[in-house]
Image: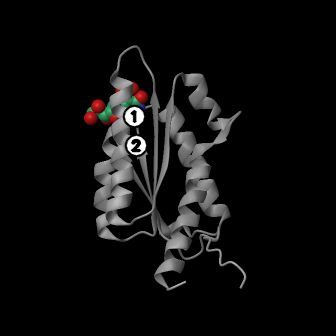
Amino acid sequence: MPQKTLEGSLSAAGLKFALVVGRFNSFITDRLLAGALDALNRSGAADDNIEIVRVPGAWELPVIARALALQKRHDALICLGAVIRGDTPHFDYVAGESASGLARVAAETGMPVAFGVLTTNSVEQAVDRAGAKSGNKGFEAAMTAIEMANLLRKLQLGA
Ligand code: INI
């Protein structure tokens, strides 16, 4: 018998998304948001099915992602932020708790949560990953959200 492989498609038609975006380092997160919206639009998502939620910073992403996940109004969440290392250990707390908090929301609620939070050592590294040399991590996060929403739907339909 041939192997059975399950994968999510990359069509966003008919799917609902929330983008949760940190305002801190908005010169970067605005670019991540633009990349994510580009991915959703080019994959067939309807504007009416896209909601943008702004939060102060990456630290605040998990609590709002959790509230949205519990509402079950979306097929996937796309969380965007930019944590840039400074001279103090603050970076480690914000980046670490944002990442582990979002992972916990996804695991505990079953809602796909794409992690589009940059954690970089410099502004230059962040710029590179927000639409310059190294692509746009917001675009990649949105594509991941689309794939995961479709894969989960397939599994729930008994694939
Ligand atoms: N929030 C970020 O999203 N990125 C950062 O680089 C950052 N730094 O460096 O401080 C940051 N801090 C704010 C944090 O997310 C909270 O909004 C704040 O601590 C209030 O809870």
The quadrant the N terminus occupies is bottom right
Residue ID for mark 2:
99
Q: How many marks?
A: 2
Q: Residues within 10 Å of mark 1 (few under 14, many from 20)?
A: many
Q: 10 Å neighbourhood of mark 2: few (<14), some, or many (≥20)?
A: some
Q: Amino acid at mark 2?
A: Ala
Question: Percent from the top left, x then y, of residue 73?
Answer: 37, 71
The reply to whether the residue tagged 1 has its Cβ within 8 angstroms of ligand 1 is yes
Q: Quadrant of ligand 1?
A: top left
Q: What is the x, y in percent for residue 46?
A: 56, 70
Say if residue 61 shows up in the picture: no
- Is residue 4 toward the left or the right of residue 60 in the image? right
- For the point 71% across and 33% down, which residue is it? 133
**The image quarter in which residue 96 lies:** top left
Please determine whether, in this image, residue 46 is positioned above or below residue 140.
below
Residue at the extreme top of the image, as rendered: 87
Element on which disc 1 rests: helix
On the picture, is 106 further left or further right than 124?
Answer: left
Q: Nearer the viewer, residue 123 or 27?
A: 123
**Which disc is residue 95 wearing?**
1
| 98 vs 49: above or below | above
- Amino acid carrying label 1: it is Ala
Q: Which labelled disc corresponds to residue 7?
A: none
